[in-house]
Image (cartoon, grey):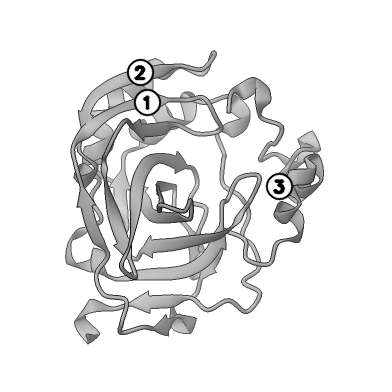
Amino acid sequence: MHDSEIKYSYNETTGRGPSRWGQLDPSWYLCGNGTRQSPIDILRLRARLRLDLGDLQRDYKPTPATLNNSGPYVQLKWIGDAGAIFIDGIKYQLLHCHWHSPSEHKFNGLRFVLELHLVHKNSIGETAVVGIVYKYGQPNPFLSKVFREIRSLGRNGTREIPLGIVNPRDIEYGGILSRKYYRYNGSFSTPPCHEGVIWTLHEQFQTVSLEQLRALKEAVKEEFEINARPIQSLNGRPVYVNVPWMI
């Protein structure tokens, strides 16, 4: 979606903010009336332990990729077979990743400064998203690899920059603690807010430098410098947790 086609905003004063997304387009009705919407606030003590989840299985491959700012965020898109994750024995192919600032999901009411979404689809079009959150700290190694290209995107018009071969495994989940994750059934966090998305959110945060975060913000239109949807009601949905050292 190009900037000229984006009908929504994250700023309520525009009349196109998140509280009105469901009214901006008939096909976006779930943004206002859905019952399994994302993001949510993950309350650790209320998460249900599931011993059958196991470690998240990743089979990623180095593949050519491009970087663009053609939407409300910076997106890295793999071209061809970048590998997959496996959830309940089902293969979900990796398509792209993008960044939201601040984080969309909260943990015990706390928002982080950045959240990365790795978007996957299975053979019948169902979506699974892996989320990773970031705090300020040392420069993020993966963002450092594409930092020059992010800086060159610019916010004046959309661009797509070839990156060459990009290994998705360079996106670190955070060592042994990354094996602890939360799983719930939600939605896309941008219009049309379609539901049925399997979310996997890692407990362990990564770090990002102020300079790296500033570059991500400066690569998009000013109205999208803040591009995190407000927290949505859980509506009784279970949130499961995988704790590897308890298995």
- Distance of mark 2 from mark 3, alpha carbons? 30 Å
In the structure shown, which secondary structural element does the residue marked by tag 3 occupy?
helix
Residue drawn where x is 29% and y is 71% of the image: 180
Q: Quick one: which residue is furthest to the front in this view?
A: 124
Q: For the residues carrying marks 1 and 3, which lies nearer the camera in this image?
A: 1
Classify mark 1: residues with Cα within 10 Å, few (<14), some (14-19) or many (20+). many
Residue drawn where x is 30% and y is 61% of the image: 86
Amino acid at pointer 2: Ile
Q: Upstream in the sequence, badge 2 or badge 1?
A: 1
Classify mark 3: residues with Cα within 10 Å, few (<14), some (14-19) or many (20+). many
Q: Upstream in the sequence, badge 1 or badge 3?
A: 3
Number of marks in the rendered image: 3
Relative to residue 148, is residue 247 depicted above or below? below
Amino acid at pointer 3: Pro
The residue that label 2 is drawn on is 161
Q: Upstream in the sequence, badge 2 or badge 3?
A: 3
Amino acid at pointer 1: Leu
The residue that label 1 is drawn on is 67
Q: Which mark is residue 18?
A: 3
